[in-house]
Amino acid sequence: MGAPRGPHAAALLNMAGGFLTPGMVVPPEVREAMFNALSSGVSLAGDLIEWKADADRLAVSLVGEAVGLRDDVTGAVWDVYANKKGVLPIAEAWDKRINNMGAAHAKFSRKHQWGPMSFLGLNSAALWFAGDDETKQMLLRHYMWAQGKACDLSFKEMRAMRSFIDFFDTVSRKVVIDGTEKTLTPYSESLKAAVEDAKWGQSRHINAVVSGASNALGNFAVHLKGVMRPATDPPVGPTVSPYKIKDLADPGVPLVFEGRMNFTDLWDFDAKVAGRFTGDKSTGRPATAEMAVDAVAALVDGVPFDVTSDDIPVTQHSGHAPIY
């Protein structure tokens, strides 16, 4: 567990050395082993005391937010019925408190790998509810125990993750790039211009960031470099996305993109219930997913983390899912 902490621990080691020395022949390796054991014991005791204090502070934070949420919602419900303000204040209060709970868990888990929710079985319950999606299971474990370290997806993991990626799509979604939330359309301006040129028979080089979606990552950024051109070869790839949230787009002219791509994302559990009452549909979460996100943020120990990936070759024909 490391060296003993503080003057009291050093004094204990000195006392142990004094008891062992007079009139005793103790092999150096035995003496060193006893010192190391005492050092580890003192360090472990300090760690446990610190863990308990931090766990108590976490509990106070969570209970405080829960009580505040109850009061906020009670007041907002009154506004709904008495002042006819609508349900948005309830959703905003809910998001604020849930996100505060998530921040409290993250603060604790950056310091301690094992949190009180693990011992209460809530982390295990979250893994069980994640189902048999191996990528989601892996990411959830990383969230719980990696203490905020970045996660780099391998080529194999990228292929195993069922994703909706369509370089000919036009729907905007929110993704996080370098810690900043941005609204991206897969049909970014540079990509849109390249598609229009390709429709008229020209080839264009592309360096763009577009959005993808998956059951494991939610909305994520796809960084791509390559060439958009008219398709002169037969199309390849399935006509239905492996993660079907909509039909694959058809620009009306056979086109193909060939190049490379990599993924980035911030994997966190941010409550966005209020977006359902402001017309913001860009999160793309169904109601059940929103409930799961809020439950993990409020009840599971973990730290949000950056997701990166290998840079891999990719080909996509219009109207077909990409091949990689």
Image (tube, grey):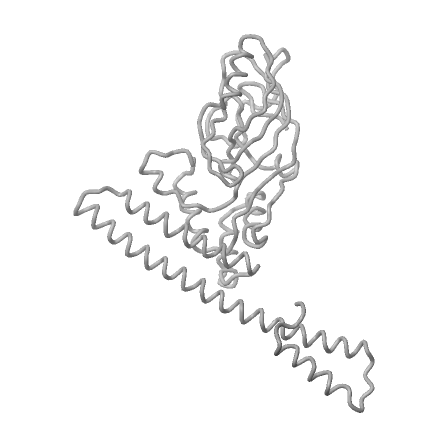
Most extreme residue toward the top, as rendered?
Answer: 200
In this picture, residue 190 sits left or right of residue 61: right
Q: Nearer the viewer, residue 316 or 174?
A: 174
91 or 25: nearer the viewer: 25
- Residue at image position (61%, 71%) is 44
Q: Residue furthest left?
A: 82
Residue 101, above or below 23:
above
Residue 272 in the image: state x and y as whole percent: 39, 42
Specify whether 208 is left or right of 170.
right
Quarter placement of the C terminus: top right
Residue 97 percent location from the top left of the image: 37, 52
Q: Which image quadrant: the N terminus?
A: bottom right
Pinpoint residue 45: horizontal percent, then vertical percent.
59, 73
The residue at 58%/30% (across/down) is 223
**Figure check: 119 above or below 7:** above
Residue 3 vertical placement versus 93 (above, below): below
Q: Quadrant of residue 69?
A: bottom left
Q: Nearer the viewer, residue 189 or 161?
A: 189
Left or right: 91 in relation to 211: left
The residue positioned 54% from the left and 23% from the top of the image is: 167
